[in-house]
Image: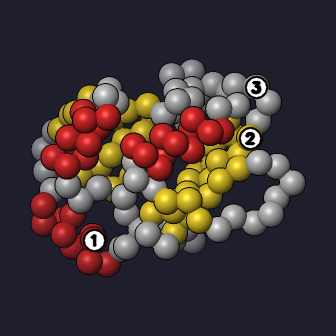
Amino acid sequence: MIEGLDHINIATDRLAETRAFYVDVLGLTERWRPDFSFDGHWLYAGDRPVVHLMSRPTAGAGSDTAALNHYAFAIGDIAAAAARLTGLGVPFRQIGVPGAPIQQLFLQDPNGITIELNYLGAQTAKERSAGDAGTV
């Protein structure tokens, strides 16, 4: 029934800061968004709008206190991602998945939402990028 994850939506009282984080740190691009009656942004990875942002008047709970612990983006180059985060002064932690060629970077957005950047190994990442232009 489910074919894949379409997008995530973040409701935030820090709209400009959150948009800047996803564009400047994670490299998403802002493109078309319907003319909703509330402020927001649609951020794209390739041709897919993967992060929707919407304004809210008060702060929500970050991942440390919410039932939704984190979400993940697939990445094709973990060294480049780690270098970018380090260069921008964004704190992160890197872990390996036991028994698998998977490396993960964990960081938080300005709302305290945990993001996993998931690197599935050189061969898997190459195969995935050939068939999926929507990865980050």
The Cα atoms of the two marked residues, 1 and 3, are separated by 38 Å
Q: Which mark is residue 45?
A: none
Q: CA distance from mark 1 to mark 2?
A: 32 Å
Position of 116 with respect to 2 (left or right) is: left
Amino acid type for the residue under numbered disc 3: Thr
Q: Is residue 99 above or below residue 6?
A: above
Q: Residues within 10 Å of mark 1 (few under 14, many from 20)?
A: some
Q: Residues within 10 Å of mark 3 (few under 14, many from 20)?
A: few
Q: Amino acid at mark 2?
A: Ser
Q: Which residue is mark 1?
A: 129
Asked where in the image residue 31 lies, by quadrant, the reply is bottom right
Q: Nearer the viewer, mark 1 or mark 2?
A: 2
Q: Residue 98 at what x, y percent from top left?
A: 16, 39
Residue at image point 87% right, 54% down: 37
The residue positioned 49% from the left and 73% from the top of the image is: 47
Q: Can you see residue 31?
A: yes
User: In the shown orientation, is residue 1 left or right of residue 72?
Assistant: right
Label 2 crowd bin: few (<14), some (14–19), many (20+), radius 10 Å:
some
Label whose residue precedes the other's in the sequence (1 or 2)? 2
Q: Work out which quarter of the rendered image holds the N terminus and state it.
A: bottom right
Please tell me whether mark 2 sits on a helix, a strand or a loop: strand
On the image, which quarter does residue 90 sit in?
top left
- Residue 122 vertical position relative to residue 90 in the rendered view, above or below: below
Where 30 falls versus 23 (above or below)?
below
Residue 120 point in image, percent of width and height: 21, 55
The x and y percentages for residue 108 are 44, 31
Q: Which residue is mark 2?
A: 55
Q: Kindly identify which residue carries mark 3.
A: 58
Q: Nearer the viewer, mark 1 or mark 3?
A: 3
Disc 3 is placed on an element classified as loop
Find the residue positioned furthest to the bottom. Answer: 131
